[in-house]
Amino acid sequence: MFESITDKISNIFKNLRGLGKISEHNIAEALGEIRSALLSADVNFSVVNNFIQRVKDHSLGQVVIQNITPEQQFIKIIFDELVTLLGTQTPSELSTKRPLKILMVGLHGSGKTTSTAKLAHFLKIKAKFSRPIAIGCDIYRPAAIDQLEILSKQISMECYVDRNIKNVPKIASLGLDYAQKNNHDLILFDTAGRLQIDVQLIDEIKNITQVVHPDEVLLVADGALGQEAANVAKEFHKAVTLTGIILTKLDGDSRAGAALSMKEVTGVPIRYMGIGEKIEAFEIFHPTRIAQRILGMGDVVSLVEKAQEQVDEKQAKELEKKLKKGKFDMNDFLNQLQSIKKMGPMESLVKHFPGMHNSHLGPETNDKIKHTEAIIYSMTAKERTNPGIIDGSRRLRIAKGSGLSVQDVNSLLKNFKQMQAMMKKMKNSRMNLASLLGS
């Protein structure tokens, strides 16, 4: 996400190098280019104009700080204004009330049903909700109930549906009664959408709201809609006061218009974002981190959090014990590679590092990891434990078994030997790939 706008702004910043001072004259061209970049990213017109004016006002009124170059200070002003645009605070946690009732609303195709399951899965892990339940209130879309049931099963969540009743508020009411009687601590209402906002849709949501009295009303908005998503949010907020927004499909949208327009247009915070098809591809929306990504500064904090989620503590402690004895074999190396793989594709991971948003390293690195795994899997248990015994004939057999060349096997063994030597030198610390990434 944000690739297009990040590339353009990065180029603008390169042209600022050597800026002698901040003045209306020497930042005029940069502001014009930033304005153009934001508009091409489908950011709301008035939002862009207000943003540029604030950056200009703050820049011209700024005293240049000692030891900070004027271009660095100008970039910092843009960063601060982006954070303000996205939402100055990290979004507050959802209500701690138990049971917590969440009403999911949005247009047809925005990803409500999928987001319902993703949010339930996320809150089970992060907020320790132990008994979530989804209530199917979409009786119009073909297979909507089937989809909700399938997704609920994937995350071990109960699902309440009624295929016979056509009165949606009644379904919501019966589902709520069932959830409360069965001690569910998280109750999510998956409502129907339309291709556009209409009176029937709004009235139905209002009626559900009056029946279930939700603690949270979350709008699920398609991030690829750009500024149109902000207009949709504005209409929903007028009808049923929203408490937060979930932006979806950000993995496929490089424009970022919705993310940059939504908060200012509606006054409603973006709480979460969907960044892929998998249930786990769901994150809290952190304004500061998103601003860093947009400006090409990376997002190492999110990368570290991803790594921490994948670290197997038991495995890490066992490896620590082995390292203290100066031992590190191919099995350990394989475990570390697999920990990294669980974090996601390399092409998405490298974008978390500063200056690597347009890196082409990812796919090649993915292939290297696959090749390394194939070579190690082609070794015997004895060879993995003691790679030193792998002679010429063994290398030939391993190469044939992995479908790679003897040179590939030689390269891996050489790299492993160097890594093994480093591990022995660092045997008094938790020096493994996972810990380097943040365990």
Image (cartoon, grey):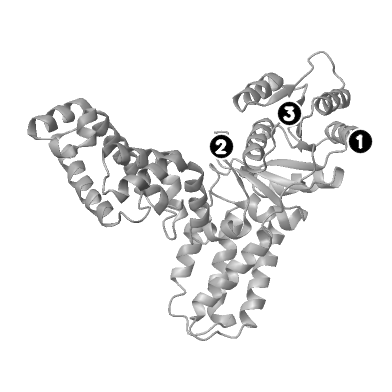
What percent of the width, then of the height, locates residue 57?
Answer: 67, 77
Residue sitting at x 13%, y 33%: 395
Q: CA distance from mark 3 to mark 1?
A: 20 Å
Three-letter residue code for mark 3: Ile
Say whether disc 1 or disc 2 marks the residue closer to the N-terminus: 1
- Image point (69%, 50%), residue name: 270
Q: Nearer the viewer, residue 42 or 339?
A: 339
Residue, disc 1:
210
Please tell me whether residue 145 is drawn above or below residue 278 in the rendered image.
above
Identify whether 1 is placed above or below 179.
below
Which residue type does callout 2 highlight? Glu
- Within 10 Å of disc 3 (Cα), the crowding (few <14, some 14-19, many 20+) is many
Q: Residue at x 22, y 45 (%)?
A: 416
Image coords of residue 192 (percent x, y): 76, 29
Would you say the residues marked 3 and 1 are in contact, meaning their CB atoms lie under 8 Å apart? no
* Residue 142 locus on image (x, y percent): 70, 19
Q: CA distance from mark 1 to mark 2?
A: 32 Å
Point out the frontmost of discs 1 and 2: 2
> Which residue bears the numbered disc 2?
280
Give the camera-side residue of 105 and 318: 318
Q: Secondary structure at mark 2?
A: loop
Q: At x 47% / y 47%, what residue is drawn?
A: 307
- Mark closer to the chain start, 3 or 2: 3
Q: Tell me the residue that label 3 is attached to.
A: 133
**Residue type at mark 1?**
Gln
